[in-house]
Image (cartoon, helix red, strand yellow):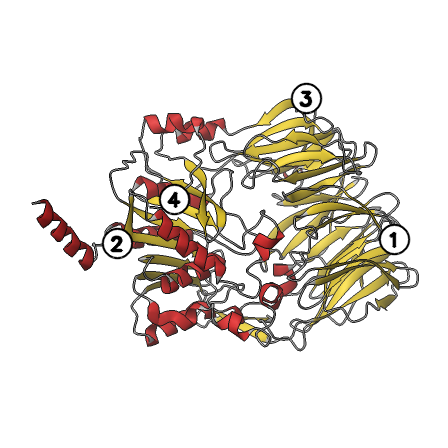
Amino acid sequence: MRKLHIITVCFLCFNAFLVAQKKTVTVEEIYDGTFRTERLDALRSMKNGKQYTILNTDRVFKNTSIDKYDYTTQEKVGTIVSSKDLPEIPSFSSYEFNDDESKILLATQKEPIFRRSSLGIFYVYDVASKQLIKISDTKIQEPTLSPNGKEVAYVSNNNLYIFNLESKKTRQITTDGVKNKIINGVTDWVYEEEFAFVKAFQWNTDGTKIAFLKFDETNVPQFSMDIYGEELYQTQNVFKYPKAGEANAMVSLHMLDVKSGEISKVDLGNPYYIPRIKWMKNPRHLSVQTINRHQNVLKLHRVDAKNNSVALLLEEKDDAYVDVTDNLTFLADDSFIWTSEKDGWNHIYLYDQDGKLMNQITKGDWEVTKYYGYDQNEDRVYYQSTENGTINRGVYSIASNGKNKKILAATEGTNTADFSSDFTYFINTYSSATVPPTYTLHKALNGKEVTKIKDNTQLLEKLKAYELSPKEFSTISVNGNELNMYMIKPTDFDPSKKYPLFMYQYSGPGSQNVSNSWMNGNDYWHQKLVSEGYIVACVDGRGTGFKGRDFKKVTQKELGKYEVQDQIAAAEKLSELSYIDENRTGIWGWSYGGFMSTNCILKGNETFETAIAVAPVTSWRFYDTIYTERYMQTPQENSSGYDENSPLNYAERLKGDYLLVHGSGDDNVHNQNSMRMAEALIQANKQFDWAIYPDKNHGIYGGNTRVHLYNKMTNFLNENLMNRPMKEMDQEEMMKSDNIKG
């Protein structure tokens, strides 16, 4: 038997859990708030650097308030605004200050559009006068206060507007916005989903200009979904969705002179995508990022708003693709900080105002995972990285010359920082697989803890009544790589017994499931399964993140090839363990993970007996341009990469038990994927189980939906994996073995 290298992490905090096994986790408890963690909601550092604000909710009276706290004492020093003092607003769900904190934008009655976009009724609250002003009687998108707090720009019905708080008058800036044709100031569906932003306009630093993007969707193919609702006839949700290889919206950059209302178009040389715009410190200068369709050549431009002239500051190239991030930071003189993978690992670089490289600030065989900012007074760059292990996260600072690095918070586990505006303090959020989130205040210069803010000891006390098992973190040697893994065993684990193995993964490019951080909903469900006698394991294979550029980008043009090979090989190797029943191996995943689990039970039909796929991609031809082409190029260029890794082409290989789940209202991974998979299995005369959740989107939630789904998956596993009969060959071999012993 090949040796499995397992480095078991000590979980002292779980000792108390293992003493008294009283209750097992139920699906209902996972989603009714029983295991909810305490958090600091909507924390904002105030400009003075000494105080911060938090959005607090009174769960009894349903009031919301913005409360102010002192960093050093952690005492609440005041309430800036409370909905109980505002007759017009029973509560508000989010807030934003203007630059001088004299005005606050309050959001109410928000309703989602897609993943990140929403509509809402918004108000502006004047802190000094306590006056409340409603921006619009109709629901609007992305309202943004001007730097001086006198105006609000927003989008309504695909057009850009400006509302004057003093005159209470509204100016319509653009007039050509039309649903499914022209969009001004907010992104189209694919930009929102894959470039991760909605607001496509920005005020400059003195409020004299607004730069905005215009999307012409005329030639983008249209997608429609039936919405069944509760009426006699269903309705349709119709929107533009560019699938791989199809036409994208034509995007252009425009400059508004706020005073005159004049709009001019900026000539960027017909860029394919414009994934980011950001004003520099100089109010005349706008930075613009453009990227080609293959997304392997990214350019950073400087636009002079006075005459719309364009200069190239930086060009980033990669054989595979270049990631678009929000790490670009301009310093006082418009020199800038940038992150790049060009040396094989994600690191921080410093450039002068004309784009000349001054210094690579961080270096090493580890990844910068978050860039927090730069304190110019102390010459400190603050960041999060994997320096303390790829499954951990630590917080560090370093001088801009790459010297004098300091460890600020690197306890084994996950550390995330929220810095005060002047970088005097940071609030560290720490968690691990055994410690729920704890919040502590630290000095930014040296990381010294000042005080404890909040923890989740009550949750830990509650969990002592439950049967919970630790995650055993390890590595497993598969296909020439040491892959991160965790395994969860029953609390009464007996190495002489045989247990069914249930594997969980996502496996998408740059993702990570094996992480030393606190539990989420899936983790609690896995605890339930473990208490019922399963062993749960998770392996991050090739293509996942935080182990360098080459490890992540090896899957280029072949999504679903190497990742599937690694999951199959890992399952086979784990099955060699004496306590794993090789005839009871299952795998599951959601979205990309559903794509993977489907491929695994088909291509690995001698390894996996059971699979669950929730909202899976079944052909990358069905998915959107930006995500898919970043990793696969177009189907016209790479047809074999698309088809050879599509489970639609391997339906005849199904031998085990397969559960297919989708929401009929999934605007992201369309239900088309599961319908085509079902048809392929039907025509291959393969039996399978499936469930369609009416009108539910990619998250499949709302009401009892999640409870129903996870109970369904639990029952499916118990019927088809836990109670799976031994194969006939195994029974024959056991009889022969018994005869020999007799």
Q: Mark 4 points at which residue?
A: 526
Instruction: Name the residue at 8% across, 49% down.
Output: 739
* Disc on res. 504: none
Quadrant where the C terminus lies? top left
Q: Where is residue 460 drawn, in percent x and y?
A: 45, 29
Residue 437 visible somewhere in the drawing: yes
Residue at mark 2 to residue at mark 3: CA–CA distance: 56 Å
Secondary element under disc 3, as helix, strand or loop, is loop
Q: Earlier in the sequence, mark 4 or mark 3?
A: 3
Residues at marks 2 and 4 touching, judged by CB atoms closer than 8 Å: no
Residues at marks 2 and 3 touching, judged by CB atoms closer than 8 Å: no
Q: Which of marks 2 and 4 is nearer the N terminus?
A: 4
* Disc on res. 73: 3
Instruction: Name the residue at 66% across, 24% down.
Output: 74
Q: Mark 2 points at which residue?
A: 719
Residue at mark 4 to residue at mark 3: CA–CA distance: 40 Å
**Foreground disc of the pair 2, 3:** 2
Q: Which of marks 3 and 1 is nearer the N terminus?
A: 3
* Disc on res. 354: 1
Q: Is residue 261 above or below residue 372?
A: below
Residue at mark 3 to residue at mark 1: CA–CA distance: 44 Å
* Mark 3, other Cα within 10 Å: few <14 / some 14–19 / many ≥20: few
Residues at marks 1 and 2 touching, judged by CB atoms closer than 8 Å: no
Residues at marks 4 and 3 touching, judged by CB atoms closer than 8 Å: no
**The residue under label 1 is which amino acid type?**
Asp
**The residue under label 2 is which amino acid type?**
Glu
Which quarter of the picture shows residue 375? top right
Of residue 101 and residue 621, the one placed in the foreground of this image is 621
> Position of 561 compared to 290: left or right?
left
Residue at mark 1 to residue at mark 2: CA–CA distance: 65 Å
Secondary element under disc 4, as helix, strand or loop, is helix
